[in-house]
Image (spheres, rainbow, N blue to C red):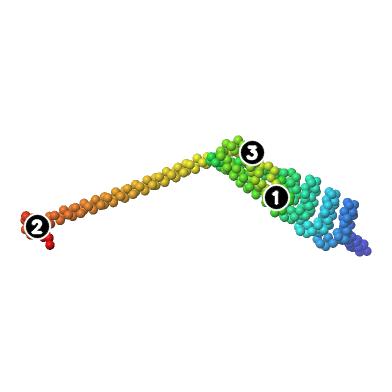
Amino acid sequence: MATTFLIYIVIAAVGLWLFFYIFPINLWITALFSGVSVNLFDLVFMRFRKVPPGLIVNSMITATKAGLTGVTTNLLETHFLAHGNLTAVIKALIVADKAQLNLSFKQATAIDLAGRDVLNAVQVSVTPYVVIVPSITGVSIDGIQLIAEARVTVRTNLQRLVGGAGEETIKARVGQGIISCIGTTKSYLEVLENPESISKAVLANGLDAGTAYEILSIDIADINIGHNIGAGLQIDQAIADLKIAKAKAEEKRAMAVALEQEWIAKVQEAKALVIEAEALVPQAMSQAFRNGTLFAPPKPLTPSKKK
């Protein structure tokens, strides 16, 4: 008898728990006392749609108490089913509303679904922060290398946050601008005397176009003198010219040696011909002696008869 009664109690407790789980009356009452109009059956259907009613109701209560408009349970459910962060979106909307920033629920959810931290984006828009640019090396017209360190103060541009470029683009553009400004300076002394001229020139180029940030200021934190690139290039050019001159001189010397060898060969050839001719003289004399013409008087020259 006691066992049966205990079983009935357990069944009743489970049924009661299941009833209150399916029908979250406590959430519905909490919403009513918080000024949020929510249908009880909508909370029941949220269970079947695998949407936590507690998260939706608490988000609606927070938005209502903060004075946000345009936020409905359907919008919250849609964003949750899209795997968005409802808590971060509501907090970001509250911060933006208090800071008088133009941020709608649609924009906030788009930023959140794009994979960005919407709450941090709004906080950065309210409180700017500094982007540290790595050391930038540039060379002035007089050939002196300058190494500059820059600090860029930015804040989030909520209207361009979706699809806008990030911090790396800001760093690259600022670095490119610094190099260009240093490269157009006649003397490195001008940069050392007036470093803010570089930051003003770079800032005037609109480097934040197409990015998710708005550049507030560019500050040159430090400038160091590097190597004398111009002198190094002149030395390298002089060494190269010297090597070219040596090569040309060696070429001329080789041509002179080749010409000398050619003349020596010709002289030796001529000597050989003389020696050969001298060797033929005794032979000719011997032949003349045998013919008896060695000591014969020469024949008189007779004039040729004209026809």
In the rendered image, which quarter is residue 23 located in? bottom right
Dot 1: element = loop
Circles 1, 2 touching at the beta carbon (< 8 Å): no
Q: Which residue is mark 2?
A: 302
Which quadrant is the C terminus positioned in? bottom left
Whole-percent x, y for residue 76 in the image: 81, 56
Three-letter amino acid code of the residue under disc 3: Glu
Q: Residues within 10 Å of mark 3 (few under 14, many from 20)?
A: some
Q: Is residue 80 above or below residue 153?
A: below
Whole-percent x, y for residue 162 in the image: 71, 53
**Disc 3 from disc 1: Cα separation:** 25 Å
Q: Is residue 198 above or below residue 86?
A: above
Dot 3: element = helix
Q: Which residue is mark 3?
A: 196
- Left or right for 24, reference 199: right
**Nearest the camera: 187 or 20?**
187
In the rendered image, which quarter is residue 26 located in? bottom right
- Precedes in sequence: disc 3 or disc 2: 3
Whole-percent x, y for residue 268 in the image: 23, 51
Three-letter amino acid code of the residue under disc 1: Ala
Report if residue 10 is visible in the image: no
Residue found 32% across the figure and 48% down from its top: 256
Residue found 67% across the figure and 49% down from its top: 209
Three-letter amino acid code of the residue under disc 2: Thr
**Disc 1 from disc 2: Cα separation:** 121 Å
Q: Residues within 10 Å of mark 2 (few under 14, many from 20)?
A: few
- Left or right for 211, reference 58: left
Closest to the camera, between mark 3 and mark 1, is: 3
Dot 2: element = loop
Residue found 18% across the figure and 55% down from its top: 276
Q: Which residue is mark 1?
A: 212
- Precedes in sequence: disc 1 or disc 2: 1
